Image (tube, rainbow, N blue to C red):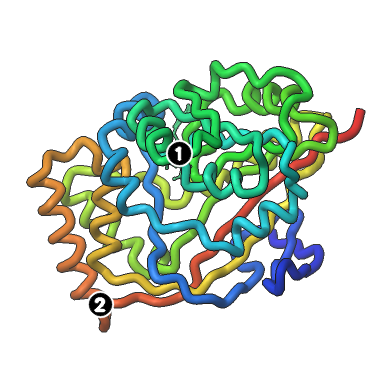
Amino acid sequence: MINLARSTTINGFEVEKANRAGNDLAVVKRSNAWNQSIGVGNMNTIKSDFDHVAKLYDSSLPPIPEEYCQLIQHRFNLGRRDRVIDLGCGTGLLTFALSRFSNNVEGIDISKKMIEIARKRDTKRRIKWICGPVESFDFGQDRYSLIVSYESFHLFSNVDGLIKKFEVGLRSNGFLCVGWCCFQWEEPLKSVIIDVFRSSGIDWEEWGYWRCSDFPAAVKRNKHLSPVIEETIRVQAKSHISSIASYLASIDKAAKLEVNAKMNLIEELTRNFKKFLSSEWISGLTSYSIAYSNKCVS
Ligand SMILES: C[S@@+](CC[C@H](N)C(=O)[O-])C[C@H]1O[C@@H](n2cnc3c(N)ncnc32)[C@H](O)[C@@H]1O
């Protein structure tokens, strides 16, 4: 059930707040040319999947909108000295954005290839890159002001155990946050995408589980963490069907396909999108969400 709490404005962008909500919350209107979805895979194959797609995934990544970075910075009041860690950081999409606000940013990812790309891009050596599973990382005690994960939390295992480790690793009043986005084309193209993937032998399984619906319940089981608050901003977006098709071929679900099969997948997706849509461009609102909890002062 959506339970709106209040509406706020950050740097002129309207943001609505809910204590636990669906996606139909705030609306931020702004042009953003490229917005695509993230695919998800089977836990056992995560490492190899992302190693396989790292380059392609990175090159097809749409940027995170400025409004979303501002929302994170304001909501968590990030200062230069705050220690922040980005879990499942991939090639550093959010990590680099965080390093604009803090001098003490770490990014951890299980995929060696993802971390390699991120490290290479970090020419000023501003970020500490860690390669390994978050499940076995030592978060220490009272260390972090913000532990955040964007489009990755749904891939982690042992959620209760992890949340305990995060809570201990957080400073008093520190924040634990998961973030995700929902692209403007997901809803209209969902059934086409599922069908085309199925015809390539790939079962899409549950759509949208990157929204981490089990996160609030897992947080609630830890008595040192406050109830989860969710906030969503919406950004005007427009994407060409060929970009969407290429992107979908770069997600981990398509990782196991040979090059030719990948090309076929792109062609099939594009052909079916054309049949389904009246234009080769698709516009709408992409939503970017955060769900977060605060470590209560002991
Ligand atoms: C969908 S990508 C998102 C990457 C990045 N946050 C972004 O938005 O571009 C998911 C990332 O989570 C990483 N990952 C999955 N399971 C992990 C784990 N147990 N520990 C650390 N990283 C993990 C994958 O290697 C991959 O880079």
Gap between marks 2 and 1, in whole Å?
A: 36 Å
Which SS class for mark 2? loop
Q: Which residue is mark 2?
A: 280
Along the line of sight, the residue nearer the viewer: 234 or 55: 55
Residue 122's disc is 1
Figure check: 162 above or below 256? above
Instruction: Please provide percent x and percent y for residue 286.
Output: 49, 66
Along the line of sight, the residue nearer the viewer: 123 or 130: 123
Figure check: 161 above or below 219? above
Along the line of sight, the residue nearer the viewer: 269 or 91: 91
User: Pointer 2 and pointer 1: residues touching (CB < 8 Å)?
Assistant: no
Q: Quadrant of ligand 1?
A: top left
Query: What is the three-letter code of the residue carrying label 1?
Result: Asp
Q: For the image shown, how many numbered marks are present on the structure?
A: 2
Instruction: Please provide percent x and percent y for residue 27.
Output: 62, 73
What residue is rendered at 48% in x and 22% in y? 133
Instruction: Please provide percent x and percent y for residue 193.
Output: 28, 58
Task: Report whether 294 appears left or right of 55.
Answer: right
Q: Residue furthest bottom?
A: 278
Instruction: Please provide percent x and percent y for residue 123.
Output: 44, 39
Q: Which of the 4 image quarters holds residue 82? A: top right
What residue is rendered at 49% in x and 24% in y? 130
Query: What is the three-letter code of the residue carrying label 2?
Result: Glu
Task: Report whether 293 appears left or right of 67.
Answer: right
Q: Quadrant of the N terminus?
A: bottom right
Task: Report whether 115 appears left or right of 295.
Answer: left
What residue is rendered at 11% in x and 43% in y? 259
